[in-house]
Amino acid sequence: MRTDVSKKPAQPDTGATQPDTVKMKIKEVVKPGKLFINGKFVNALSGKTFETINPATTEPLTTVAEGDAADIDLAVKAARKAFDEGPWPRMNARERGKIVSRIGDLIAEHAEEFALLDSLDNGKPLNETRNVDVPLSVEVFHYYGGWADKIVGETIPVNGPFLNYTLREPVGVVGQIIPWNFPLLMAGWKLAPALACGNTVVLKPAEQTPLSALRLAELCLEAGLPEGVLNVVPGFGPTAGAALAGHREVDKVAFTGEYLTGQEVMKAAAKNLKRISLELGGKSPNIVFDDVDLDAAVKGAMRGIFFNQGEVCCAGSRLFLSEKIYDEFVGKLVDEAKRLKVGDPLDPSTQMGAQVSQDQLNRITGYIEKGKKSGARLECGGERAEVPGLKGYFVKPTVFSGVKNEMTIAQEEIFGPVVAALPFEDLDDLAKRANDSIFGLAAAVWTSDIKKAHSLARKLRAGTIWINCYNMFDAASPFGGFKMSGFGRELGAHALELYTEVKSVWVAL
Ligand code: ADP
C-alpha cells in the first residue's frame, strides 16, 4: 500500500482538525444506517438497532439497523430473484463492466466522504483512508470493470466428432462477510469481482464498521446496479453472519476474518456445499539480513507492523533479524516507534489512530502482558497511549525483543501494534523457523543477495512474499493464504475463479 508510516505524511492540512469544520463534516456524512435490501433502505424486521462507536472517542457515532436471520433471508431472496430472473447476469458483459467501473468513479467523487466515514467508524488515520483505503477501492472497481467482458471459455480438442467448449458463468448468489479493519476496501475486494462476473450479492459488513458499505450500496444503485443485485445487511456475526453462511439459497460464501470464525463459516457452508473462499489471519515473518540498507529495512518493518494500528492480517509481526545487526536494528526500530505520532485519526499528521474497539484493546493489552510474563524484553510501548482530549482505544507502538518462536506472542495473531523481534544466525534453519506457524498469509525478505531472496521466496510457505518491501498491494496481484490463513485468491485474474463456474458444452457434429 502506498503509505509510509515511518514518515511524516506530506498531506496538506485540509482543516479537518478544526473542530467546527470536523463537526459539520461529521454531521453531513454520518447518518443512521438501515439495511439495504432489494434497492431500498429498510428497518430490521425485529426493529432492533445497534450503536456504532467512534473508537477515538468511545462515543456512539450513530445507530444502525440490526439484521438477523429473518433479514438475511429477505436479502437472499432478493439476490436470488435478481440472479434467477433479473437483467444482471444476462446483460452484455461490457455494459456490466461499465457499471462496475462507474462504482469506482462514484467512490472517487465521494472520496473525502468515504475517508471520513471509515476513519470515524474504524479509528484509522484520515491520512491512510485518504491515501490507501479510498484510492485502492476505486482501483479495484475500475480493474474488475475492465475484466467483465474478458472472461472467456475455451475450445477443447476432444476425441470424436464433437465440438467441446467451456462457458464461464457466474456462481449465483454470493454471501460476503467482511471484517472491520479496511471497511470500504474489503467491501471493494469482495464486491468488484463478484459483480463483474455477473453474480448477485448479500454483503454483511462487520458490526464495528457498517457505515461505508451502506453508503457504497447507495452509490451502486446510482451507478446503475439493478435492484436486488447488491444487498447489505449489517448485524452481528453469530446471528446475521451465521445465517448468511448457512443459508441454503446462497451458492457461495466469501469470508475475511479470524481463522476460528472461518472454521464456523466453513461448517455452516457445508450444509449445502457452498463454494467457499476464506482469507484469514496471519503471523507473517519479516526477515532482515545483514547486507541491507538498515534504514530502509527499519522503515519497512515499521510499515509492516504499525500500518493501520497493526490491524492487518498480513502484518509483519514476527521480525527475524540477523544476529549481526540485531541490536542496532532493534535500537533504530525503537527510536522510530517512539517517534510515531499516535493521535486523533482526523488530524492529517497522525500516523497511528485508535484500535477499533474495547475488545480489541483488551486483546492487545492481554498479549502484551503475556509477552512480558514469557520473558521477552519490552523495548518500548506496552501500554495505552494518551491522546489529549480523546479517551479512545489508543495503544503505543510496542516492540518486544529476545522473543522465541514458541512464545505465545510469536505464535498467535495479536492484530495490534506489537512486533516480536527474533534473532537468527544462519540461513539453514531460517525458512523452517519462519514457517513454524499455523498461518501462511505473507512473508518478507530484506537482502541485497538475489539468490538468497529468491530461494527463500520459494521456501516460505505463504501466499505473498515481499522482497525489500512490505504491504504492497495492487488490484491485479493475487492475495490469499497458505495453511490456516485460508484458501482462494482474491484480486487479480485469480478472483474470477472464485466467482465463476465452468460449464462444459458438447455438440455432436
Ligand atoms: P474479528 O475478531 O476481527 O472481529 P471476526 O472473524 O469475528 O473477526 O469477524 C469478521 C466478520 O465475521 C465480521 O463481519 C463478523 O460479524 C463475522 N462473524 C463473526 N462470527 C461469525 C459467525 N459465526 N458466522 C459468520 N460470520 C461471523
Image (cartoon, helix red, strand yellow):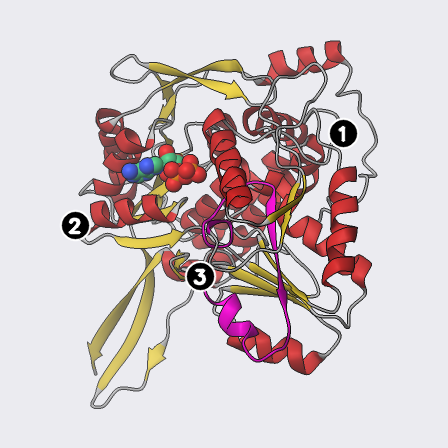
- First reached walking from the N terminus: tag 2 or tag 1: 2
- First reached walking from the N terminus: tag 1 or tag 3: 1
Q: Name the residue beneath numbered marker 2.
A: 272
- State which mark lies toward you, 1 or 3: 3
Q: Name the residue beneath numbered marker 3.
A: 437
Visible in this render: residue 6?
Answer: no
Give amino acid for label 3.
Ser
Query: Alpha-carbon distance for marks 3 and 2?
Result: 31 Å
Q: Residues within 10 Å of mark 1 (few under 14, many from 20)?
A: many
Residue 358 placed where, x, y %? 49, 25
- State which mark lies toward you, 3 or 2: 3
- First reached walking from the N terminus: tag 3 or tag 2: 2
* In front of the other: 439 or 489: 439
Residue drawn 22% across the image and 84% down it: 162
Q: Name the residue beneath numbered marker 1.
A: 348
**Position of 494 relative to 361 (above/below):** below
Q: Quadrant of the C terminus?
A: bottom left
Residue 429 placed where, x, y %? 54, 76
Q: Residues within 10 Å of mark 3 (few under 14, many from 20)?
A: many
Callout 1–callout 3 Cβ contact below 8 Å: no
Query: Alpha-carbon distance for marks 1 and 3?
Result: 37 Å
Residue 90 placed where, x, y %? 34, 49
Give amino acid for label 1.
Pro
Bounds of the magenta segment: 408-436
* In front of the other: 159 or 339: 339
